[in-house]
């Protein structure tokens, strides 16, 4: 029997999904990462896309949010991913010797799919390398609320003895708020610059805040950082605040991994261990400082004046050092839900002059990341009703329009992240991420590697195909071989095996990967939770399926899932037209960038946070009833 | 020849003047103090007056701002200073054995003028011990701007899942500003108290600031600390913010003494030594934390919600960690002159919930202490023109009324503090502080000790008497013995001696204390500076002497100087009626307390700071001309 393996081009940001909880070694990946993986920078024009992780340059490009050209999906067949990496890398493989000319090899040209970094590596990209779904300019006029004024102030003199701060205020023509560290540095910079300084001001209610006073005319050198703190991956986007242009981007595993892959393990550590909260805050601040260092490699970090932060409610609390117990323990409330502004330095971030703005949360389990998704998808301004869903351990979803917005969290469990699944793994090299079942089985893996497990989107695909082929009934029962004999091909029957008293369906034999009855049940429960959430949102809003004009699937999982399979198993209500579903990538990061560049959008986000009607799905009175209905795998 | 020594009751706060600069050992007193002197507490009703320094209980009471009853001035003759000190003290002297009954001695009753502490000592006072000039209630209705609300909040529940901070805001009925540390502590206190909490709010422009949330009903436990940071001595006054009542008071040498007794030595250290500014800030914060510990001995420091700080401009800058170079170097400007509010904890003060308000400065050399003196004396609201003068190394003076206020600094040099004077010393035990010259010389010393030097007020007295008796002419020349023979008594002539080619006048022979020609010249220059300042202020305001309705002498020196002598040598313009001069004690501390207890008075102080017309005396165009006129010692 032939086991086919095929690949498709590795989509960007694949590693954004979480690793499984049951693999203890993987928990330490955040730390191992620092020791064994190497930072890599892709440079396009003047922009930097940085990442740190494991894999080939092709994999790392995806992590960094760009993609090297590739037609063969990284199998070394198309030679489109030619590049000239600078820095220590693995030696040329026989495949490269075959695909590249001796002249190319002599010039250091290599195939991105074959090369792994052995230290810090930089790769210059061509314009077409940019992943359109992720990067590119934001179509908005920057008005971040930053004002810079170049002041040529009179020197203090016998008859002009006003104080340094008052001199600045006179130059500006208005009073300012100022934090003590800025005031402490003021006299030195004024005198070193002979009173020619640039004052950077941040718009606040009341007097603007004087963020920095720097020597000389520094207007035009003003940057901001938008940060999306994911439970697994943290991404930073550095933008020029004046032009709106993206300058650099960096991704990194969240350094809180040692305390668990999922939010609840981390909340437990913060609540139960002495110094636990401090551990977790320090870890995320260190991660952010690595990202800051990468993003500011070519600029002065003192010229970063604003940081916007989105993340789920727990990440928000841990980054701010707020105790997570109220979120983690029923009845689940945040410590603070509204927008918060603090000095970045107060959090320990290596941005001495920046103000850090945390977007508001929607609720204890629908965070600022979902708010950012609403902002990025424009759900709050849409005339038609739209749905935005971020599927993960906790499904977060919002439904509505400019009239009314509802949001809820659906505790799906870790099945969609490949965790607690017998052969589950996170969406990384070797994970089965696509399955087709006809007379036999065909699987695709990430990186075209031999299959070593199955990731969330692969599991959805596999179960949808198993239902379609009659291996699994609508009730979720994996049919024993005797019941399907005669109805299925011999190849498929051979893959139905009994083990430990239960049936499982073999996707790959060497290495062995199968889907068990238990796995189907777990997926069924997870999908029922999501579907139930969507249906209850619709009931609450009083809308039926034809009335939902668009479905935005945010996050990595949403980007990679096959909408047909999602509809087939009823992860999304099956009556939804497939063409209304679109993956919107890291829409949370996009929303953070929009809030960074526009004060109007920050205000809009705050207004949205106030008006979204939030509920905890599991507390909804019709939850149990609907949940049972939703357990069916498709119609 | 008989040398008489007499004493008068030791006035309160005598040790507030600086020690002389030329005694290197004394510079280290701030540090030695911690090792060899002991903290003492005087307790009156429930109030604590704490001090740490050297001397007898009688001396230390004066330092603490109270005075033990005494008729003999501490000579052990009147037995009025009977008290029962608790703690380790020196054993009873033969004088005490004589003055006290065996029963009294058996009960632990002692004479305050004979006892020195050997460790931490407490003394219970009678009501009449209170020094009226220093202590007592402030005659104002407290309205500090603190609001406390006791909230019995609903617990979070299934249908009431608003965030902790929003819950507080709902309970208060309005939004608040909140610093991160307060927010970080919020969930724990809410849950430990079952959502019964007291919120303490500080009035700001815009939303009030949530300073603290504490378990249970804590209304009524709200304190504030007013601090006067002197170059030599730091005094703290703890008040009940609701009743206005004084709860405790503590005095302590400024811990910056190791870096010089005067402001310029300290400014030099801050400007020139690596980490110099940090040294000085740390030292003053430590001093303040000692004062805080003394004042909060019977209350919880978490219930101190406000600190008001006054001090000269350098002390203000060093406490805030602001570089002093702009103040110390021409053209002498502060870094910030306006009022500043920071969290006390941000400065390192051991008051976790307090907001620290620094009163504004008037100019680089007329600080918030002078502003506080104006507030305390009511100069800014007076219909008649008044003068307030604080005489020290730098004379600070304000002249005016509710119509117009002028202020200037007069760099008198250290003569008034006994420094750079041949036998100069600070106003402590053994310092000659009063001199009368008739046919012979009679001197009084502090503590009736054998004379070991002369302090500032003693020098003013001595020179005034020497001028009056014809030993010194109006031009400041100490007349050689041949010129005065026949005109003066034999006793006086014997005291005119020639040494090292110059004449000096002997005040005491064993130990030897004399006033030299050089000393007279130094005093002459110092007094000319002060007089010149007063005269130029009067010229600028367009007022002549009968128009000055009152003269307030602030600070220790002003309290102890004999107004007749001050007028006799022309330290104050001689045409001033003596009965308009009054010592106002620590009026700076009084002003700090007023600002602590009243938001209206803080605003008044800010308005005064904006309207006072400030100038540097030495930069005034008529300074040199007037200064020469003022060199004459009286008319």
Image: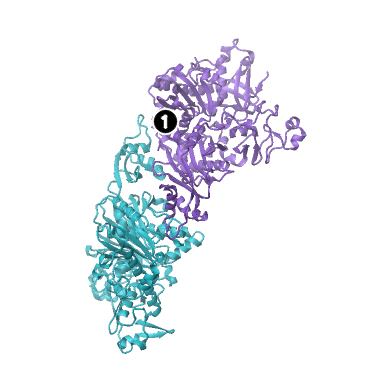
Chain colours: A cyan, B purple
Q: Is residue A345 visible?
A: yes
Most extreme residue toward the top, as rendered?
A: B486
Secondary structure under the numbered disc 1 in the rendered image: helix
Q: Is residue B356 above or below residue A631?
A: above
Residue under numbered circle 1: B608
Specify whether A126 is left or right of B633.
Answer: left
- Indicate the quadrant containing the N terminus of chain B: top left, top right, bottom left or bottom right: top right
Q: Is residue B617 above or below residue A108?
A: above
Q: Residues within 10 Å of mark 1 (few under 14, many from 20)?
A: many
Between B599 and A574, the one nearer to me in the picture: A574
Residue B46 x/y as whole percent: 61, 39
Give the letter of the chain under mark 1. B
Between A372 and A62, the one nearer to me in the picture: A372
Quadrant of residue B603 within the rendered picture: top left
Q: Is residue A128 above or below residue A298?
A: below
Specify whether A201 is left or right of B292.
Answer: left
């Amino acid at each position: 029997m032939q086991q086919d393996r095929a690949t498709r081009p590795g989509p960007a940001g694949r590693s954004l999904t979480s690793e499984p909880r049951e693999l203890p070694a993987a928990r330490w990946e955040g730390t191992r990462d620092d020791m064994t993986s190497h930072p890599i920078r892709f440079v396009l024009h003047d922009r930097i896309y940085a990442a740190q992780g494991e894999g080939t340059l092709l994999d790392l490009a995806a992590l960094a949010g760009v993609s090297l050209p590739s037609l063969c999906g990284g199998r070394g067949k198309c030679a489109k991913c030619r590049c000239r990496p600078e820095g220590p890398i693995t030696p040329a493989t026989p495949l490269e010797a075959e695909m590249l000319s001796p002249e190319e090899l002599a010039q250091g040209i290599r195939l991105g799919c074959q090369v792994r970094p052995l230290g810090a590596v930089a790769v210059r990209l061509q314009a077409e390398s940019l992943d359109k779904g992720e990067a590119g300019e934001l179509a908005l006029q920057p008005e971040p609320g930053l004002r810079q004024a170049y002041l040529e102030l009179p020197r203090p003199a016998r008859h002009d003895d006003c104080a340094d701060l008052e001199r600045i205020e006179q130059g500006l023509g208005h009073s300012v708020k100022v934090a003590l560290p800025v005031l402490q540095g003021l006299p030195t910079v004024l005198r070193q610059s002979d009173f020619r300084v640039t004052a950077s001001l941040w718009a606040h209610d009341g007097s603007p805040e004087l963020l920095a006073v720097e020597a000389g005319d520094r207007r035009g050198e003003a940057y901001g950082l938008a940060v999306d703190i994911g439970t697994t991956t943290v991404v930073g986007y550095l933008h020029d605040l004046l032009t709106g242009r993206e300058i650099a981007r960096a991704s990194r595993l969240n350094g809180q991994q040692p305390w668990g892959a999922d939010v609840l393990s981390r909340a437990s550590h913060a609540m139960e261990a002495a110094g636990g909260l401090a551990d977790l805050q320090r870890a995320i601040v260190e991660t952010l400082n690595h990202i800051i260092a990468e993003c500011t490699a070519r600029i002065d970090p003192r010229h970063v004046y604003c940081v916007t932060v989105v993340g789920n409610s727990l990440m928000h609390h841990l980054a701010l050092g707020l105790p997570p117990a109220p979120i983690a323990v029923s009845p689940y409330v945040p410590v603070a839900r509204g927008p918060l502004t603090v000095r970045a330095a107060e959090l320990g971030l290596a941005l001495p002059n920046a103000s850090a703005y945390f977007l508001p949360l929607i609720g204890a389990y629908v965070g600022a990341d979902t708010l950012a998704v609403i902002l990025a998808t424009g759900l709050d301004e849409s005339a038609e009703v739209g749905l935005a869903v971020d599927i993960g351990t906790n499904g977060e979803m919002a439904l509505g329009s400019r009239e009314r917005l509802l949001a809820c969290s659906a505790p799906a469990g870790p099945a969609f992240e490949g965790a607690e699944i017998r052969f589950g793994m996170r969406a990384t090299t070797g994970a089965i991420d696509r399955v087709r079942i006809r007379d036999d089985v065909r699987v695709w893996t990430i990186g075209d590697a031999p299959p070593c497990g199955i990731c969330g989107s692969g599991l959805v695909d596999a179960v949808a195909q198993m239902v379609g082929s009659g291996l699994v009934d609508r009730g979720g029962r994996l049919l024993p071989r005797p019941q399907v004999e005669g109805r299925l091909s011999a190849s498929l029957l051979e893959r139905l095996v009994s083990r430990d008293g239960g049936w499982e369906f073999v996707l790959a034999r060497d290495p062995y990967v199968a889907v068990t009855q238990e796995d189907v049940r777990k997926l069924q429960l997870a999908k029922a939770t999501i579907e139930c959430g969507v249906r209850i949102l619709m009931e609450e809003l009083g809308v039926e399926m034809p009335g939902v004009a668009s479905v935005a699937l945010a996050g990595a999982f949403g980007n990679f899932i096959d909408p047909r399979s999602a509809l087939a198993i009823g992860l999304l209500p099956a009556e939804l037209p497939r063409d209304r579903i679109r993956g919107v990538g890291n829409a949370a990061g996009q929303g953070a960038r929009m809030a960074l560049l526009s004060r109007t959008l920050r205000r809009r986000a705050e207004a949205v946070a106030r008006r979204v009607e939030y509920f905890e799905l599991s507390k909804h009175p019709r939850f149990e009833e609907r949940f049972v209905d939703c357990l069916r795998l498709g119609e």
